[in-house]
Image (tube, helix red, strand yellow):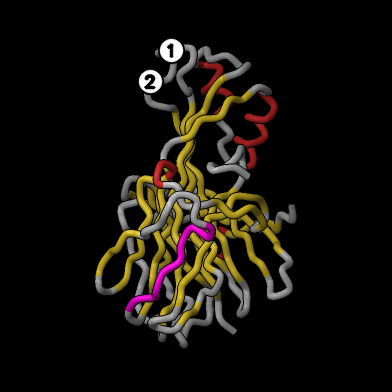
Amino acid sequence: MFSKYLFGLVIFCAPLPALAHEFWIEPQEYQVESGGTLVADLKNGENFKGSSLGWFDSNFTRFEIATAEGILPVEGRAGDYPAMTLTAPGEGLLVVLHETTPARLTYREWEKFLKFAAHKDFPDAAAEHAARGWSQERFRETYTRHVKALVAVGDGAGQDRPFGLTTEIVALENPYDPDFAGPMQVQVLYKGAARADAQVEVFARDPAGTVTVTLTRTDDQGVAEIPVSPGYDYLLDAVVLRVAEGAGSDPDAPVWRTLWAALTFHVPR
């Protein structure tokens, strides 16, 4: 019922993510047995391909797993690669949660900011920037990442829900449910409220590793419908761009803040 919001196909490493790169959680296996070893990487890159990042507690404010029994921290030591290795608890749907500490970047070229704003669907950003009298040279942005991954432990039964991330993509379907046939419906939230008419970028990786990218939009309830195929991995991305706290108070203060939400999951054959 939400397919009207889908439009044209768009075929298009360091401790913290780089400019305009995606950041996501990538389990080495999306389905594991109860008591088995669950391993996942924090990834930074483009088109669902990238570098693995290590476990550094200075780089995140939240790194947890959520199960039917509760929420547990992901423990690690500085420099651990992969960033998450643990014994899968219980049975059911397990949700990995990760939020990063703020990082900064400096735009040295105005065109790069325009390209980013256009790609992430913020057509009014340039006019807002000019109206506030901000420089188009060497201005700063601060950004954070707010990411989740869905993993099936044993039968994988259960349901995703909001977990209070600043911005968040919530799966309204369980892709590991034996009765799931697609499409996947998700809701995009910002500070707990639905983001209406928000762009969602969909990265679909087939079993051979080929990645295609599509764009869709949320409806007035923040819900988007994602066509899915068995055997594919999916990365969904939605970005908030807003004026940074304290913008204009100091020449070195960031003027923009971006908040990146991402969700990864697999659709079994």
Q: Kindly give the residue lying farthest to the left in the view shown.
A: 69
Left or right: 201, with 87 as reference point: right
Q: Residues within 10 Å of mark 1 (few under 14, many from 20)?
A: few
Residue in view at x 67 percent, y 34 percent: 115
Rendered location of residue 91, percent (x, y): 35, 82
Which is nearer the eye, 249 or 6?
249
Q: Amino acid at mark 1?
A: Asp
Question: Residue at left 65%, top 22%?
Answer: 108
What is the x, y in percent for residue 119?
Answer: 64, 42
**Which quadrant: the C terminus?**
bottom right
Secondary-structure class at tag 1: loop
User: Which residue is the site of mark 1?
Assistant: 250
Any magenta on residue 240? Answer: no
Cβ–Cβ under 8 Å for marks 2 and 1: yes
Q: Which residue is identified by label 2? A: 246
Residue 172, quarter of picture: bottom left
Highlighted range, magenta: 81-89
